[in-house]
Amino acid sequence: MIRPRLILEEIRPYYNSPEAIIITGMRRTGKTTLLNLIFSQIESANKIFLDLENPLNRKYFEDPNYEKIKSSLEILGLDFTGKAHIFLDEIQFVRSLPSVVKYLIDHCRTKFYLTGSASFYLKNLFTESLSGRKFIFELFPLTFREFLVFRDSTLRIPENPRDITRPIFESISLLYDEYLRFGGFPGVVSKTSIAEKQRALDDIFTSYFQWEILNLGDFRKNEMIRDLIILLAQRIGSKLDIQKISKELGVTRPTLYEYLSFLEGTFFIKLIRPYTKSKNSEIRKSPKVYLCDTGLANRLANLDEGRIFENSIFQNLRTKGEMAYYERKNGAEIDFLLDQAHAFEVKTTPQQRDVNQLKRVAGELGMKSVQVVSRNFTDLEGTLYGFMI
């Protein structure tokens, strides 16, 4: 059974628009499954689905004569006298594809639905060639609410923290513990044993390293990227000291920035920049690093519960908008600011002083809402639980 993702509701309004729909994200997040689901929802019979990981399917789009490409697609059953719907999976395998898509959109009113696993690669190719002709959607590992659906759970999370009694908290925590430990990749969630989940996570990392780093990255020292990934996993939630890391790895700072840009562009990490009204000040301050998934984080590093919990809150908040962190010279800080309007402070076991400080600092920044996010059960007012994000 194909289970819908929350992002589907964001994509659905664009089914009838002329622009191409591009779904990108890290490998194994469910892009192909989502594309198949959309394919099944398009009622028109004038549609085709091609997996470009298959070298034979790539040949249809490699001819320099775009009219010949059109003819090949007609042989496959498409009728360009009406609105044709073309679904292409793994588009990063065909370098000339953006110009082909542009041609068919402009000359044949073709609707494209595309997926690709490397944002770093896709954005470089598609930004200019498809300007004004595309909508890009980023698919991430499952949020906890999606995780419950994929686990066929009947649990319903109350909207108000006051409605969560200790027995309700304990019931939800049984599944939340699993989510924190093994993350939200659909292929991992579907496994039933710990050993199977661990093997699935190892396979996801191996696949990422093989396809994104070795095939797309074209770096001279791939082992340096590997060492950087492990080092970053150990620093989840911490500010990056670029000079220190460059010395530790034995690479120049420009090279390190190149590596970080690639890892972020291919969705493996996310760098959270500081919130400030001065762009120059923002450039001088160090970003914080988070991994795409707590399951991978646990496989790569021996992290304490607090860091894993914080990374999970990052995973669930990033689907809701733009993120930043805030820190003052006196040490007062806010873990996450969402869309420069909502403040979140993450605590394993919050205290009243944490609530008071967040309200004070966030209030001075003019935030619309403030929430201390707790991992453990608490009676404190002004808090919510991680599984509610």
Image (cartoon, rainbow, N blue to C red):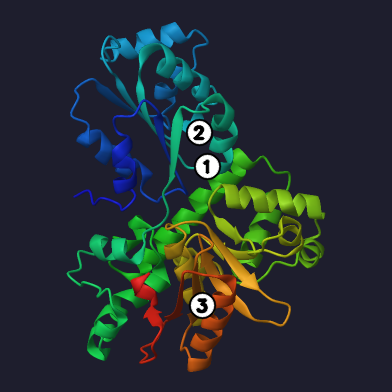
Left or right of residue 120, residue 348 in this image: left
Which residue sits at x=54%, y=31%? 126
Estimate the x, y position of residue 178 in percent, counting from the top left.
35, 73
Precedes in sequence: disc 3 or disc 2: 2
User: Label 1 crowding class (10 Å Cα cut-off): few <14, some 14-19, many 20+?
Assistant: many
| Observer able to see residue 11 | yes
Report the amino acid beneath label 1.
Answer: Ala
Q: Secondary structure at mark 3?
A: strand
Disc 2 target residue = 92
| Observer able to see residue 235 | no
> How many numbered discs, if any?
3
User: Label 2 crowding class (10 Å Cα cut-off): few <14, some 14-19, many 20+?
Assistant: many
User: Label 3 crowding class (10 Å Cα cut-off): few <14, some 14-19, many 20+?
Assistant: many
Report the amino acid beneath label 3.
Answer: Glu
Q: Nearer the viewer, residue 189 or 389?
A: 389
Report the amino acid beneath label 2.
Answer: Gln
**In front: mark 3 or mark 1?**
3
| Residue 307: numbered disc | none
Disc 1 target residue = 118
Estimate the x, y position of residue 328 in percent, counting from the top left.
69, 76
Rendered position, 373 above or below 256: below
Contact (Cβ within 8 Å) of mark 1 with mark 2: yes
Left or right of residue 353, residue 283 in this image: right
Q: Nearer the viewer, residue 55 or 328?
A: 328
Q: Secondary structure at mark 2?
A: helix
| Residue 345: numbered disc | 3
Q: CA distance from mark 3 to mark 2?
A: 38 Å
